[in-house]
Amino acid sequence: MILSDKTIREYMKQGRLSVEPIDDVQIQPGSVDLRLGDHFLKMEHQEGVMLQLSQKPRYEDIITEEIIISPHSYILATTREYVKLPDNVAAFVQGRSSLGRMGVFLQNSGWVDPGFEGEITFGLFNANNVPVKLTSGVRICQLVFAQLDQTAQRPYRGKYQGQRNATGSRVSLDADLKPDNLE
């Protein structure tokens, strides 16, 4: 079941769900709009280097109120809001169609597990042939909340729990990428 605006407000009032800071205008009929933060990560260019899942990638750290995304490039960004989901509610992260119609696509963060808390990190891809300028505070994506049929037996408590700012990939921490598991 997708939560309605009425249920979202009730859950927030009861403290069962938290999105902070929030203005009432961000609550839509079946979702909550989230705003672009001011922290970004751009993959460092390293000549002759190939990304490997077992190694931690290197990023350039950018803090700014305005970001220009070059044509056909990708950056990691974060929401201004800190989200806390109960153990029986998950969320879908959807890019705003108004931005998609301009060739700016939200990537990489389509699902938020029950029990997650933190700012949402997502990728932004500029599919245009021209640069795109975005300003911190603009509504960038929306969360659609889904009630689970029951509380999760193992709610999220993973490697991104409590994240603040844009957070780079931590896939190198995955147990199945450890050398003893690759045989």
Image: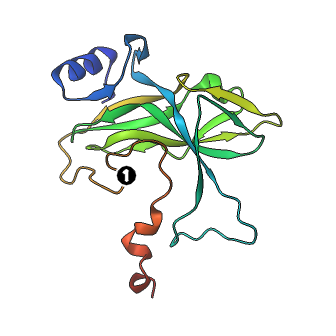
**Tag count in the figure?**
1
Q: Which residue is at 76% across, 40% downward?
A: 70
Query: Residue under circle 1?
Result: 160
Q: Is residue 43 above or below residue 111?
A: below
- Classify the position of the C terminus by image quarter: bottom left
150 or 66, nearer to the observer: 66
SS state under label 1: loop
Residue at 47 percent across and 49 percent down: it is: 167
Image coordinates of residue 143 in percent, x first then y, are 42, 30
Residue extending furthest toward the bottom: 183
| Residue 85: x %, y % from top left | 27, 36
Residue 71 position by quadrant: top right
Where in the figure is residue 77, as x and y percent of width and height?
54, 40
Q: Residues within 10 Å of mark 1 (few under 14, many from 20)?
A: some
Quadrant housing the N terminus:
top left
Report whether 137 appears left or right of 175. Answer: right
| Lateral position of residue 19 relative to residue 136, left or right | left
Instruction: Give percent across and percent down for residue 118.
Output: 35, 40
The answer to whether residue 22 is left or right of residue 66 is: left
Which residue does the image show at 72% across and 46% down from the upper left? 73
Q: Is residue 116 above or below residue 146?
A: below
Residue at coordinates 50% horizontally, 33% vertically from top-left?
94
